[in-house]
Image (cartoon, rainbow, N blue to C red):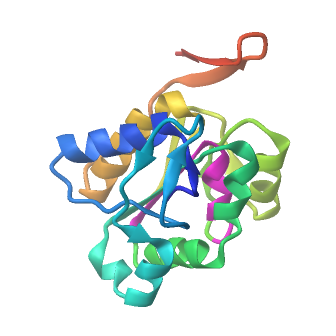
Amino acid sequence: MPTDIFNVVELRAVTKVLKREGVDYDIRALKKEIWAEDMSVAVELSGVISDVWEEGNWTQKYDIVFATSGEPKRKRILTEDSRARDIIKGMYGVEKVVAAICATVPILVDIVEGKRVTCYDSHSVKGPLKRAGAILDMRTVVIDGKVITAQAPPLAEIWAEVAVRVARGEEVEEPAKYAYKNPNLGVYHIVE
């Protein structure tokens, strides 16, 4: 569920894990055409979010919904879209896995009260989550029941693997790692 501009690392990691695990999937976005942040790659979509909404059977059709991020200025497009948020609430309401990463974690504001989540380390991302009653836990990947969150794009593959395993009913431990961003280099470092 990316916006019209997506994070290549996150979307590729999710599709890689789903293919490897033999999981059928659809890629749906807010618009009919989506591009990588650097505009170098277009993605073929299964449809748009409004199609899923109109079909009305998404809670029976899907076991997991992944919300991937994109250009930071555009993350609000997805997190504030009422149809996207209703899909999240609907999936969560029937005990399906909902997974969000990085700057897209605020899409979960309707379901995170009292839940542990992680997200991109920014006030504009953390603020809505705190106001919604989430418990911020800045580990790399956080599992709270069927809500799976991850902090940053380099964690996307681990995050997707965890979500698939939780959807299958497997016991999963949170990765015991932390990530921090080097402000001088703009890169993440993963530490134990």
Residue 116: give x, y in percent of width and height.
61, 51
Q: Quadrant of residue 184?
A: top right
The residue located at (46%, 83%) in the rendering is 53
Residue 166: give x, y in percent of width and height.
33, 53
Q: Is residue 4 left or right of residue 184?
A: left
Please tell me whether residue 109 belongs to the stretch shown in magenta.
yes
The residue located at (82%, 61%) in the rendering is 131
Q: Is residue 6 above or below residue 80?
A: above
Please tell me whether residue 188 belongs to the stretch shown in magenta.
no
The residue located at (68%, 57%) in the rendering is 106
The answer to whether any part of residue 23 appears in the image is yes
The residue located at (76%, 64%) in the rendering is 132
Residue sitting at the far left: 22
Q: Is residue 35 left or right of residue 103?
A: left
Residue 134: give x, y in percent of width and height.
70, 57
109, 70: nearer the viewer: 70
Magenta-drawn segment? 96-110
- Total residue callouts: 0
130, 79: nearer the viewer: 79
Q: Is residue 156 above or below residue 134?
A: above
Residue sitting at the far top: 184
Q: Quadrant of residue 38?
A: top right
The answer to whether any part of residue 173 appears in the image is no
Q: Is residue 130 left or right of residue 165?
A: right
Q: Is residue 128 above or below residue 12?
A: below
Residue 45: give x, y in percent of width and height.
37, 60
Q: Quadrant of residue 62?
A: bottom left
